[in-house]
Amino acid sequence: MRVEVLERSEQRVRLLIRDAPLPLVNAVRRACYTDVPVMAVDYVEVFQNNTVLYDEIIAHRLAMIPLRSEEALRKYKWPEECSGARLGDPDCYVVLELEVETGPREQRVVYSGELRSLDPDVRPVYDNIPIVVMAPGQRLHVRGYARLGYGKEHAKWMPVTVAAHKYLPRLTFDASRVSAECMRCIEDAAPTVAERMRKLGRGTIEITDDINTSGLYWCVTKRCSGSDVKLEYSDREFILTVESAGQLKPETIVLKAVEAIRRKAAQLLKEIEELEAGGATAGREGGGS
């Protein structure tokens, strides 16, 4: 299997994966959603709240605020290790405090940036997420406890907004035999592809640009009949796109997803070996009776 980075930014990574089976690529995609731990508020203590929102709504809004988690993966125990930990255990939980009071004539919006974290490495990714609108003379005092968790537990622990893959499109053509109607259609559907066709003249183009090739496929099948142009999708080459919600770098998400798959595979092999060993023992015991 070979992996090439097509695009990498603070929030997004696009990978070209060659010589890989679809189930493996799909497993990585799914693991990005469900098996990569990030920090999120899990418990909330409400000391005072006379705002328009119920305690439960405030707690839910706090839980859905994405928290920076790069350093948390190194500093805090993982969910499996914290299943029986006491609330507030410093090895498992980070405390975030919010205390706001409005004056007799003050009205204001409370934002995520006003949360005070005891760990500066675990803080809201965005400071402008609204929590509640407070009327004059109101007070809100809450304390949240954040821990590492998995997306398979709750959506608040999903580190991605998008994790998707598609087959690699490959366009084979001879520009000298492409009709004018066909080329006009391709220009409308995928201008960059049409430009590359003119420059190359003939041959094969791997379409790794971040474009939707549905329109291009329609052109090839409906407007290019009789022209020497063909669009195919490779079933062993894929483009994987992962967009982070901000808690982790996108490349960290992919690496942790791969690690999760390796752990699951190792655990499965171990259990199979144990079953086989148990079966062999039972066979020997039965044969000697």
Image (cartoon, rainbow, N blue to C red):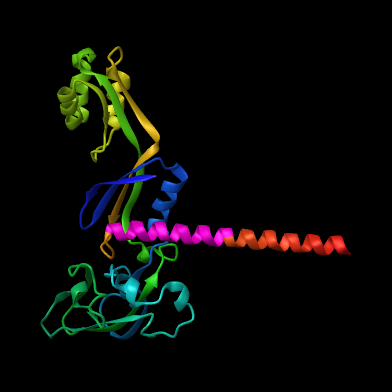
**Observer-nearest of 199 and 165:** 199
Q: Residue at x 36, y 62 (%)?
A: 158
Rendering quarter of residue 284 = bottom right
Instruction: Single out the residue that lies furthest toward the left.
Output: 105
* Residue stretch in magenta: 250-269
Residue 264 drawn above or below residue 70? above
Expressed as whole percent of the image width and height from the top left, the position of residue 192 reads 17, 32
**Observer-nearest of 109 and 81:** 81
Q: Residue at x 38, y 33 (%)?
A: 234
On screen, residue 137 versus residue 231, left or right, reads left
Rendering quarter of residue 152 = bottom left
On screen, residue 77 versus residue 178, left or right, reads right
Residue 230 visible in the shown view = yes
Expressed as whole percent of the image width and height from the top left, the position of residue 193 reads 20, 29
Residue 32 drawn above or below residue 230? below
Rendering quarter of residue 39 = bottom left
**Observer-nearest of 176 and 67:** 176
Q: Residue at x 34, y 78 (%)?
A: 55
Taking the magenta stretch, the answer to whether it contains residue 219 is no
